[in-house]
Image (tube, rainbow, N blue to C red):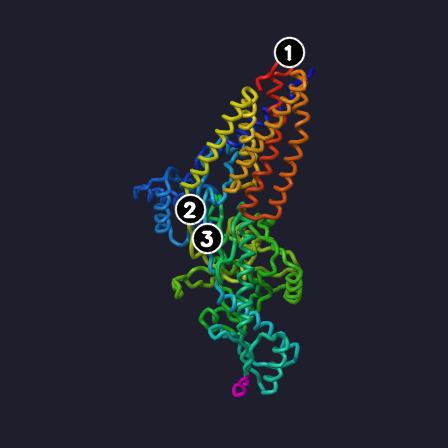
C-alpha cells in the first residue's frame, strides 16, 4: 500500500536513535577538576603513598571528593578548580621530585556508561581548555654532542688518511677540538684534509705545540641549532601521537622554545613525563682487562669510564660507543623465556650494520646498555631555568652469544613498568638535544568562559527560533520536522562521541549551527514539493509519495557538493578548519538521513495509507 513502511524499518531507525542517544548521554555529566600523580621512570605508586596524600589534603582543609589508585597512578578529584590548584601545590611539597603532579579534567561518566565504552565528546582547547607546555631546548648540549661526534669522525678520517696523531680531544667550554700531532707536516696535512671534507670548520694551526684547533663556524652553529629544534619538534609530535591526543598543537616559538598544547588530555602526568623525558641509549663493551678496584679508587684507565648499574654495582666500560639510540626505529616491551621483563630493539639499516660489525669481533664479551637521561639540577642559568644534569645508568649487562643484527633484546630490567616506559620513550625517538618543561599551565577557552556561554546561548535561541517557525508555518508537519531536527542533533552528538579522533572546536560549533539550518532546508524542500503536488490535483497519498521522491534529488545534489567541500577542508586544513569540516560532514550525513528517512517514517506512520482530503501543511 502507498506510504506504508514495514515494521523492520521502524525498528532499525529507533535502534540507531537509541544507540546514539546512549553514547551522547556522557556529555550531560560535567567533568571534575582532578590531579594526576605518577612516579618518575614508570614506577608504581604504593597504597601507602595514596593514603599519605589523602590525609595531607584532609589536614590542610582541602579534602578531595575521591583519591583513587588506578593503574599505578593516583587520581584525586575535587569539586572546584580552586581546590585543585591548592592540592597541586600540596602534592608537590609532600612528594618532591620523584613524582609528577599535573592538572587535568576527568570525566564523571557513570560506571554503566563507561562499561560500554561511552565517553564524552572530545572538546578542543578553545572550548574545553587543556594543558599548555612551554619546552626549552638545550642548544649548548646540541653543540657539545656535535663536537663529540666530530671527535670520533676525525679519528677515523685521520686513520684512513694514514696521518699519525697523539690525541683528539673536545674542549666543550671553549667549543673546539684539539688534535695533537708528532710533527709539523702532519698538522698541515690534517688541516688540508679536514677543511676539504667540511668547509664550515674553522682551523687554527699551532706549530709551537704541534696542534690543530678546530671550531665550528657561526653558520654551522646556526644550522645545528635549527636542526636540533626542528628534529625535537618532530619527536615531540611522535611522542604526542604515542599518548594519543586528538588535534594537538606542537609548534616552534622563538629560537629555542617549543609550545605543546594538549586539548582533552586525561592523563597529563604521563604526557608531561613523556614530553620532558630525554632518554636515549648507548651500547658499550665492558672492560674486563682493567682493574675494577683501582678504577673505583680513582685510578681510571685511559680508554675506560666507570658507571653504576641500576642495582648499585660499579661497572667499567670502554669509552668507545658501539651504537647510540639514534638508530633505534622501534621498541616493544615484553617478557623473555624466564618471564622477566624485556625490551626488543629494532634498528635501522645503518644501525644494524654497525651492531653487526661491532659484535662480530666481540662474541663472548659482555656488552652493557647505558640509559642516559637529562634532569633539572640545582644550579640555574641567567634566565632562571635550571641547568640540566646528565645522568647515566647501566640497565643491562649481558654476554654477546652470537653476532647481533637489526633485532635484539634488552633484559635485566627491574619491572614490567620500567620496560613499558623505556619502550615508549625509545619508540617516540631520542631527542637531538635535551629539553625541559619551563612552563606548565591549564588554559581555559580562548574566547573566555563568558563568550562561550554567550555562544551556546545564541545557538540555543537560534534553534528555538527555527523550531517555532517550522511549527507555526508548517503546523503538524512542522512538528515532524522539529522531531527530525532533534533526532539529527542526537545523531551528531552521539556519532561525534563514538568516533575516537573527532574533536569539537569552536568552529565545529559553527558547523553544527550550519547543519541545523541545512537539515531544516531539506524538510522545507520536501514540504513545499508536497504542496505543489497537492496544487496539481494529486491525491494526499500521491502527493506525500511524490513529494519525498522528487525532492530527494535536489536534496542529494546540494548536500553532496557541500559534503565534498567538507572532505576537502578536512584533508588539507589544520586545527580549527578540520574541526569545522568534521562536524559539517557528519551533520550533512545525519541531516539527509533524518530529513529523508526519519521524517518520512513519521509522516507515513501518522498520515500514510489513510483516505484524507487535506494535510495539516
Residue toward you, 247 or 137: 247
Give the main secondary structure of the magenta stretch: loop
Task: Indicate the quadrant containing the N terminus: top left, top right, bottom left or bottom right.
Answer: top right
Is 438 within the magenta? no
The label nearer to you, 3 versus 2, is 3
Q: Give the residue number, with chain letter if any, for mark 3.
A: 133
- Please report the bounds of the magenta region as a residue range: 205-210
Closer to viewer: mark 1 or mark 2: 1
Q: Earlier in the sequence, mark 3 or mark 2?
A: 2
The disc, 1 or 2, on the residue closer to the chain's N-terminal end is: 2
Identify the residue shown where x is 51% and y is 61%.
Answer: 372
| Rendering coords of residue 589 (x, y %) | 61, 34
Residue 312 appears in the figure: no
Residue 262 in picture, x, y percent from top left: 49, 48
Q: Could you tell me which secondary element the residue under label 1 belongs to?
A: loop
Question: Disc 2 marks which residue?
Answer: 103
Q: Which one is in front, 249 or 296?
A: 249
Measured as percent of width and height from the top left, residue 58 is found at 32, 41
**Residue 17, percent across and down?**
57, 27
Left or right, residue 364 beside residue 104: right
Q: Look at the numbered disc 2 and give the secondary structure of its residue.
A: strand
Q: Is residue 17 above or below residue 276?
A: above
Distance in Å between CA atoms under marks 1 and 3 = 68 Å
Quadrant in which the C terminus is drawn: top right
Q: Going by the image, does 293 lie left or right of 594?
A: left
Residue where numbered disc 1 is placed? 611
Amino acid at each position: 500500500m502507498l506510504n506504508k513502511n514495514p515494521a523492520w524499518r521502524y525498528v532499525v531507525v529507533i535502534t540507531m536513535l537509541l544507540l546514539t542517544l546512549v553514547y551522547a548521554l556522557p556529555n550531560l555529566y560535567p567533568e571534575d577538576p582532578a590531579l594526576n600523580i605518577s612516579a618518575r621512570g614508570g614506577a608504581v605508586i604504593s597504597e601507602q603513598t595514596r593514603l599519605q596524600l589523602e590525609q595531607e589534603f584532609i589536614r590542610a582543609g582541602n579534602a578531595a571528593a575521591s583519591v583513587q589508585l588506578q593503574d599505578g597512578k593516583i587520581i584525586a578529584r575535587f569539586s572546584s578548580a580552586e581546590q585543585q590548584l591548592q592540592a597541586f601545590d600540596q602534592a608537590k611539597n609532600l612528594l618532591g621530585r620523584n613524582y609528577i603532579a599535573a592538572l587535568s579534567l576527568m570525566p564523571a561518566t557513570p560506571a554503566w556508561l563507561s562499561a560500554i565504552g561511552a565517553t564524552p565528546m572530545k572538546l578542543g582547547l578553545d572550548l574545553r581548555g587543556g594543558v599548555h607546555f612551554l619546552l626549552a631546548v638545550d642548544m649548548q648540549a646540541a653543540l657539545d654532542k656535535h663536537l663529540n661526534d666530530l671527535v670520533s669522525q676525525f679519528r677515523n678520517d685521520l686513520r684512513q688518511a694514514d696521518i699519525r696523531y697523539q690525541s683528539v680531544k673536545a674542549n666543550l667550554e671553549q667549543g673546539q677540538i684539539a688534535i695533537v700531532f708528532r710533527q709539523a707536516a702532519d698538522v698541515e696535512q690534517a688541516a688540508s684534509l679536514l677543511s676539504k671534507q667540511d668547509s664550515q670548520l674553522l682551523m687554527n694551526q699551532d706549530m709551537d705545540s704541534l696542534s690543530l684547533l678546530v671550531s665550528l663556524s657561526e653558520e654551522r652553529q646556526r644550522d645545528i641549532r635549527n636542526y636540533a629544534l626542528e628534529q625535537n619538534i618532530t619527536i615531540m609530535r611522535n611522542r604526542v601521537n604515542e599518548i594519543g591526543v586528538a588535534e594537538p598543537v606542537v609548534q616552534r616559538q622563538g629560537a629555542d622554545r617549543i609550545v605543546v598544547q594538549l586539548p582533552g588530555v586525561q592523563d597529563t602526568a604521563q604526557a608531561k613525563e613523556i614530553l620532558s623525558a630525554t632518554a636515549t641509549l648507548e651500547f658499550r663493551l665492558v672492560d674486563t682487562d682493567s682493574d675494577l678496584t683501582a678504577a673505583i679508587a680513582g685510578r681510571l684507565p685511559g680508554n675506560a669510564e666507570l658507571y653504576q648499574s641500576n642495582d648499585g654495582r660499579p661497572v667499567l666500560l670502554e669509552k668507545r660507543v658501539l651504537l647510540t639510540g639514534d638508530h633505534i626505529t622501534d621498541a616493544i616491551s615484553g617478557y623473555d623465556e624466564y618471564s622477566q621483563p624485556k625490551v626488543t630493539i629494532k634498528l635501522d639499516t645503518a644501525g644494524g650494520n654497525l651492531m653487526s660489525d661491532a659484535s662480530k669481533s666481540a662474541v663472548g664479551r659482555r656488552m652493557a646498555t647505558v640509559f642516559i637521561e637529562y634532569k633539572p639540577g640545582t644550579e640555574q642559568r641567567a634566565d632562571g631555568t635550571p641547568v640540566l644534569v646528565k645522568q647515566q645508568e647501566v640497565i643491562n649487562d649481558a654476554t654477546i652469544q652470537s653476532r647481533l643484527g637489526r633485532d635484539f633484546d634488552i633484559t635485566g630490567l627491574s619491572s614490567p613498568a620500567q620496560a613499558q616506559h623505556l619502550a615508549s620513550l625509545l619508540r617516540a625517538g631520542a631527542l637531538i638535544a635535551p629539553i625541559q618543561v619551563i612552563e606548565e599551565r591549564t588554559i581555559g577557552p580562548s574566547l573566555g568562559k563568558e563568550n562561550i556561554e554567550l555562544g551556546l546561548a545564541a545557538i540555543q535561541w537560534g534553534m528555538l527560533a527555527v523550531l517555532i517557525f517550522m511549527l507555526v508555518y508548517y503546523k503538524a508537519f512542522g512538528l515532524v520536522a522539529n522531531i527530525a531536527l532533534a533526532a539529527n542533533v542526537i545523531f551528531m552528538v552521539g556519532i561525534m562521541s563514538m568516533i575516537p579522533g573527532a574533536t569539537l572546536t569552536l568552529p565545529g560549533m559553527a558547523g553544527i549551527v550550519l547543519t541545523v539550518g541545512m537539515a531544516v532546508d531539506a524538510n522545507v524542500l520536501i514540504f513545499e514539493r508536497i504542496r505543489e503536488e497537492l496544487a496539481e490535483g494529486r491525491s494526499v497519498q500521491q502527493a506525500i509519495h511524490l513529494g519525498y521522491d522528487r525532492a530527494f534529488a535536489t536534496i542529494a545534489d546540494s548536500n553532496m557538493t557541500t559534503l565534498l567541500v567538507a572532505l576537502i577542508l578536512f584533508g588539507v586544513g589544520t586545527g580549527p578548519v578540520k574541526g569545522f569540516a568534521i562536524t559539517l560532514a557528519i551533520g550533512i550525513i545525519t541531516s539527509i538521513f533524518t530529513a529523508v528517512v526519519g521524517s518520512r517514517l513519521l509522516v507515513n506512520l501518522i498520515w500514510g495509507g489513510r483516505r484524507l482530503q487535506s494535510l495539516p501543511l
